[in-house]
Image: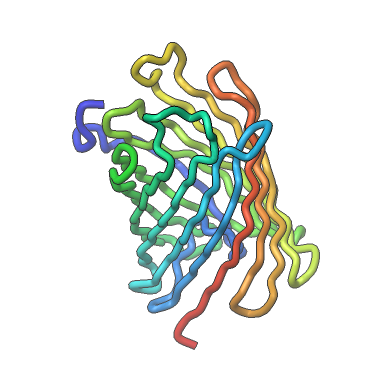
Amino acid sequence: MNTLAHRLIVPVLLFGVLYASPAAAGPWTPERFGYYAQTSVGLAGAEKPSELDLKLYGEFGLLDSLGVIASLPVQFDLERDAGPDAKRVRFDPTVGLRWRFIPGPLVVAAQLDVKLPVSGSAEVTPQLLAGSGIGVLNGFFQVGAGYRFRYGSADEVVATADVGVWPTRRLLVIANAAFRIQTGPEPGAKLAEREVMLGGQVVWRTGPKVDLGIDVRTTIPTASVPAGVSGTFYVAFRGGRT
């Protein structure tokens, strides 16, 4: 892609969770001066773990309908034979804004994320977010799609689908699906990447402000992306003016 600015008007659609899930996603924004914070540690790889992931994620309510977002992920390469030019540590911070302009029952918001070019290329991802609850299941659904502008690399179309159910007041079970399609191959590659990830989360609500969660994802092998598995444990905190 030559520039980010002249290609920034692209229709996107992303649906999210109405019944507030502990997962950091969806169109909801914290109330004014409210917050959501998550810290996580995870492993990813194919036949054996090849990457250690640490991440801090946070949302802060500037207004009841406007929130600022920050994600600080650090990735450690565990492969011993990765080569002398491989980056052993990657740090790709992301900042964003989310504006919730329809409060419900179908919540709708607009979000813009910007990944800073610290270890990799700059990325800009505009999205529309929406979501609703599923009363009969005491849960929620989330589906979505978006467009990721990547400076110096092939752009990507991304999509997600999630369904969550609360079997009890403290236990939440979520099924996840995610899709990523490059608009063209990377320099030197023959095929554009097509990635499909399936997984799930189990979350235990320990109290009114703290959740513990386990997130497991598997990558379905395609002609351009190998199989893989990732597992993450996270702790989430939330609060507000009350």
The residue sitting at 27% across, 29% down in the picture is 152
Quarter of the image for residue 227 reads top right
In the rendered image, residue 68, in percent from the top left (x then y), is placed at 35, 64
Number of numbered tags placed on the structure image: 0
The residue sitting at 21% across, 26% down in the picture is 2
In the rendered image, residue 38, in percent from the top left (x then y), is placed at 52, 64
Q: Quadrant of the N terminus?
A: top left
**In this rendering, is residue 77 above or below 27?**
above
The residue sitting at 46% across, 56% down in the picture is 108
Q: Nearer the viewer, residue 229 or 160?
A: 229
**In this rendering, is residue 141 above or below 18?**
above
Left or right of residue 191, residue 67 in this image: left
In the rendered image, residue 63, in percent from the top left (x then y), is placed at 35, 73
**In this rendering, is residue 132 above or below 62?**
above
**In this rendering, is residue 100 above or below 216?**
below
Q: Nearer the viewer, residue 222 or 76?
A: 76
Toward the top, the furthest residue is 190
Q: Nearer the viewer, residue 92 or 198?
A: 92
Left or right of residue 118, residue 156 in this image: right
Toward the bottom, the furthest residue is 242
In the rendered image, residue 23, in percent from the top left (x then y), is placed at 58, 59
